[in-house]
Image (tube, rainbow, N blue to C red):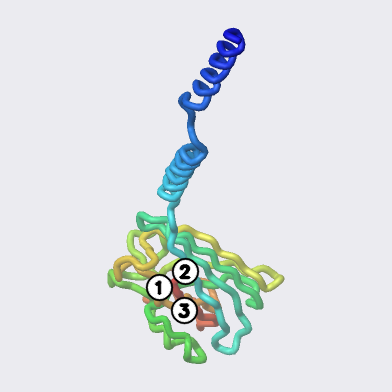
């Protein structure tokens, strides 16, 4: 009888030791995991850089058939990447400029005003010349299939920045001929054959 009681006592002690020993509840483990995930997500979010974007839908002017789209991405520090794609244009070189007023309502697009030129300097070729309008861009080559693409990174532009750099609300104009980068005030590029207003992408 004493032997049986002693064995029972040992068994009961073992059970109590196991049930009372140190352990980590599922709730504690879940809380720790959630904290780790939250910290990880925060670090990822803080590392992302949101870049401002804008676009212009290109419509015909001066009885042309030119259409297309321009996209703009603000890289920061005064740099904006610009890509223009057009269709139904006459093969050859076409001058591309930003004009001061975002208004393409006139049939010849003259409602867009002159070149965007906040510094009031002479027209020229960027970045070769010492002076050029903020709206001076380059000539775009259109192939025999009547399509053209022009991609550049422009220094001195912004999307939503200071008035002297902000391209939002300006008009993108495509001309019928090439810019000679010498004639004043606009490069003798001919009539305006397409126009699009630059709008910020929200």
Quarter of the image where the C terminus is located: bottom left
Residue 168: numbered disc: 1
Residue 164 visible in the picture:
yes
- Taking the spot 61% from the left edge, 80% from the top edge, the residue there is 66
Q: Secondary structure at mark 1?
A: loop
Give the residue pinned by disc 3.
Answer: 197
Q: What is the CA distance from the residue labelled 2 to the residue labelled 3? A: 10 Å
Q: What is the CA distance from the residue labelled 1 to the residue labelled 2? A: 7 Å
Give the residue pinned by disc 2.
Answer: 54
The crowd level at tag 3 (other Cα within 10 Å; few <14, some 14-19, many 20+) is many
Image location (x, y in percent) of residue 69: 56, 73
The reply to whether dot 1 and dot 2 touch (C-beta < 8 Å) is yes
- Taking the spot 33% from the left edge, 73% from the top edge, the residue there is 117
Please state which of residues 43 and 36 is positioned toward the viewer in this rendering.
Answer: 36
Q: Earlier in the sequence, mark 1 or mark 2?
A: 2
The crowd level at tag 2 (other Cα within 10 Å; few <14, some 14-19, many 20+) is many
Q: Secondary structure at mark 2?
A: strand
Please state which of residues 50 and 128 is positioned toward the viewer in this rendering.
Answer: 50
Image location (x, y in percent) of residue 21: 47, 24
The crowd level at tag 1 (other Cα within 10 Å; few <14, some 14-19, many 20+) is many
Q: Is residue 36 left or right of residue 3?
A: left
Please state which of residues 201 and 125 is positioned toward the viewer in this rendering.
Answer: 201
């Amino acid at each position: 009888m004493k032997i049986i009681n002693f064995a029972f006592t040992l068994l009961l002690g073992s059970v109590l030791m196991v049930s009372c020993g140190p352990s980590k509840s599922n709730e504690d483990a879940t809380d720790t995991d959630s904290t780790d995930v939250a910290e990880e997500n925060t670090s990822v979010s803080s590392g992302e850089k949101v870049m401002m974007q804008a676009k212009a839908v290109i419509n015909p002017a001066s009885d042309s058939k030119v259409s297309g789209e321009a996209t703009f991405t603000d890289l920061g520090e005064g740099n904006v990447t610009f890509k223009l794609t057009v269709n139904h244009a006459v093969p050859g070189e076409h001058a591309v400029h930003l004009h001061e007023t975002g208004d393409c309502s006139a049939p010849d697009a003259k409602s867009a005003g002159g070149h965007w030129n906040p510094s009031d300097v002479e027209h020229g070729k960027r970045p070769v010349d010492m002076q050029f309008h903020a709206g001076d861009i380059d000539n775009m080559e259109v192939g025999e299939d009547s399509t053209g693409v022009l991609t550049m990174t422009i220094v001195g532009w912004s999307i939503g920045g200071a008035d002297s750099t902000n391209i939002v609300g300006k008009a993108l104009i495509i001309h019928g001929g090439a810019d000679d980068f010498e004639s004043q005030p606009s490069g003798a590029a001919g009539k305006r054959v397409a126009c699009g207003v630059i709008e910020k992408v929200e």
